[in-house]
């Protein structure tokens, strides 16, 4: 009888010590569930506002939600037992797997950042990692580009993120530079006026910034100068505007007898006596 009473007292004592821990563990777990739902919903709303790819949106929000739940569960279990050894083993396992899949994880992380930052969209003309072309697909591992000469290039997202990205589509107003030469005997003020008049006929030309003609240096047989002008690429293609500028300058020069000289080389021949 005494043994039974002693066991009952010990059981009551153990239960009295367990109940507060159980209450704290349950509270931690419930708070983690609430925070997981709150953070996940907040991330979804932010990503929807940024018009991020739906797959990436779901992946990021679910990753955040389960990370908080797992962390809360571990903290709740910590109330009953020391899970340090378990976490250490889990960390070693995670490090091993992460090291084996480091390239995959690197591209995955870069893909998430690209989808969040959105330096370009599908259909944009970009230049990245020495490739120029149109973006045709973006996923969590790679970016697909169709180059201007018709090739399809799949660039790992880590390479995309590690290189400078030039987005041509977002730059509506573009500057064109043409290199031209005229003969030494040309009247430079006349040349400048004729070139500006010719450039004024380029389709899509912008008045601001105004076109410029800048004389640069004396060559072997001519005076070199550069022509700068800006065009609206929504009205004319960049190559078309460059082509039009060269043609108009050549036509104007021919009309006003402005010479574009050929290189002249003087060869001295020494005759034997």
Image (cartoon, helix red, strand yellow):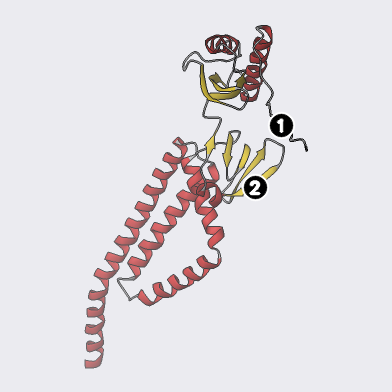
Report helix, strand or loop for mark 1: loop
Above or below 43: residue 258:
above
Report helix, strand or loop for mark 2: strand
Residue drawn at (42%, 44%) of the image:
43
* In-front residue for pair 199/26: 199
Give coordinates of residue 150: x percent, y percent: 72, 37
As drawn, the label of residue 244 is none
Residue drawn at (71%, 32%) of the image:
268
As drawn, the label of residue 267 is 1
Q: Quadrant of residue 226?
A: top right
* In-front residue for pair 233/109: 233
**Is residue 253 found left or right of 85 in the rendered image?**
right
Give coordinates of residue 202: x percent, y percent: 61, 14
Mark 2 / mark 1, whichever is N-terminal: 2
Give coordinates of residue 221: x percent, y percent: 63, 24
Residue drawn at (52%, 56%) of the image:
106
Residue identifier under label 2: 154
Q: Residues within 10 Å of mark 1 (few under 14, many from 20)?
A: few
Residue 136, can we see it? no
Work out which residue is located at the far bottom of the displayed protein and give it. 2
In three-dimensional space, the C-alpha distance between marks 2 and 1, rounded to whole angstroms, equals 53 Å
**Figure quadrant of the N terminus:** bottom left
**Is residue 28 found left or right of 56 in the rendered image?**
left
């Amino acid at each position: 009888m005494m043994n039974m009473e002693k066991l009952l007292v010990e059981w009551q004592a153990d239960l009295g010590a367990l109940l507060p821990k159980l209450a704290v563990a349950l509270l931690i777990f419930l708070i983690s569930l609430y925070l997981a739902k709150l953070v996940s919903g907040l991330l979804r709303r932010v990503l929807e506002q940024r018009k991020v790819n739906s797959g990436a949106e779901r992946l990021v929000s679910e990753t955040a939600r389960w990370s908080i739940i797992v962390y809360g569960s571990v903290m709740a279990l910590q109330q009953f037992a020391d899970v340090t050894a378990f976490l250490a083993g889990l960390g070693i396992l995670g490090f091993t797997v992460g090291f084996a899949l480091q390239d995959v994880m690197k591209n995955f992380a870069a893909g998430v950042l690209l989808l969040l930052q959105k330096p370009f969209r599908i259909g944009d003309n970009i230049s990245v990692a020495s490739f120029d072309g149109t973006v045709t697909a973006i996923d969590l591992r790679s970016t697909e580009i169709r180059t201007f000469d018709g090739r399809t290039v799949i660039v790992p997202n880590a390479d995309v993120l590690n290189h400078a990205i030039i987005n041509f589509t977002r730059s509506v107003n573009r500057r064109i530079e043409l290199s031209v030469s005229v003969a030494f005997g040309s009247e430079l003020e006349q040349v400048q006026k004729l070139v500006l008049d010719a450039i004024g006929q380029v389709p899509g030309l912008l008045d601001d910034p105004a076109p410029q003609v800048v004389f640069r240096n004396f060559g072997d047989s001519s005076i070199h100068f550069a022509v700068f002008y800006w065009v609206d690429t929504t009205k004319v293609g960049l190559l078309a505007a460059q082509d039009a500028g060269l043609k108009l300058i050549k036509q104007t020069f021919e009309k006003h007898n402005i010479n574009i000289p050929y290189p002249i080389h003087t060869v001295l021949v020494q005759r034997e006596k």
